[in-house]
Image: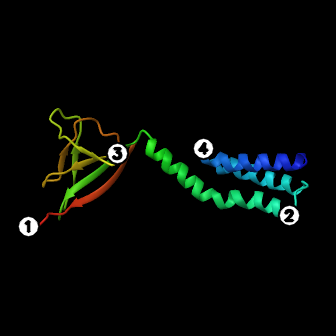
Amino acid sequence: MNKYDKIGIGLIIIGFLIPMFVFMGFIIGLPIFIIGIISLLFGTFKLKQKLIWILTPLVLLYPTSKAVYEISFYFADIQKVDLILPENFKGTAIIIDNTDFGQKFDKKNRREQVVFDENGIAFYPTELELQNSRFRVFTKKKTEN
């Protein structure tokens, strides 16, 4: 292993890791990755070893970036809210936040469950931060007994 191999492997690893942890990191990581490939091609490794060092990061890029995204989303300081509307609800749903008489909401799977009444109104006890929230909308089915 000569210095071109070491430099190439180092640049390939750095070019692989930068997109995982830097916003828009592909703009920085891709050129570093390509320079690492070119440097590795000038090294003394056999063709099979070079191909392994080049193709392994390409194959692992999507699953690794997806895993990093999911883990960071799970631990992020983001308000996760499920909005549950009544069955056959038509119209505009309204959330009134910062109320002293706000409803109590359950948490399931680290997500707050906001259940609207038949009129489509929910009173939220604190401020709902829209820019830092992830919403999902569901309709509540009536159970027939």
Question: Looking at the rendered structure, which numbered label has been put on residue 145?
Answer: 1
Q: Which of marks 3 and 1 is nearer the N terminus?
A: 3
Residue 25 percent coordinates (x, y) = 64, 47
Q: What residue type is labelled 2?
A: Leu
Q: Which residue lies furthest to the top in this view?
A: 100
In this picture, residue 134 sits left or right of residue 58: left
Disc 3 from disc 4: Cα separation: 24 Å
Label 1 or label 4, whichever lies nearer to me, is 1
Indicate which disc, 2 or 3, sits on the residue closer to the N terminus.
2
Disc 4 + disc 2, Cβ < 8 Å: no
Q: Dot 1 surroundings within 10 Å: few (below 14), some, or many (20 or more)?
A: few
Label 1 is placed on what type of residue? Asn
Check disc 4 and give the amino acid type. Answer: Phe
Horizontally, residue 125 falls left or right of residue 132, namely left
Q: Quadrant of the C terminus?
A: bottom left
State if disc 1 and disc 3 touch (CB < 8 Å).
no
Disc 4: which residue: 21
Circle nearer the N terminus (1, 2): 2
Q: How crowded is mark 3: few (under 14 residues within 10 Å), some or many (20 or more)?
A: few
Q: Which amino acid does label 3 sit on?
A: Arg
Q: Name the residue under label 3.
A: 110
Measure the C-alpha gap from mark 3 to mark 1: 31 Å
**In the rendered structure, are the residues bearing label 2 and label 3 in contact, judged by CB atoms less than 8 Å apart?**
no
Q: State the residue position of label 2.
A: 47
Residue at left offset 69%, top offset 56%: 57
Disc 2 is placed on an element classified as: helix
95, 81: nearer the viewer: 81
User: What residue is drawn where x is 86% and y is 57%?
Assistant: 41
Q: Examine the image and state in which quarter residue 66 appears.
A: bottom right
Residue positioned 27% across, 52% down in the render: 83
Residue mark closest to the camera, 3 vs 4 = 3
Q: Is residue 124 above or below residue 61?
A: above
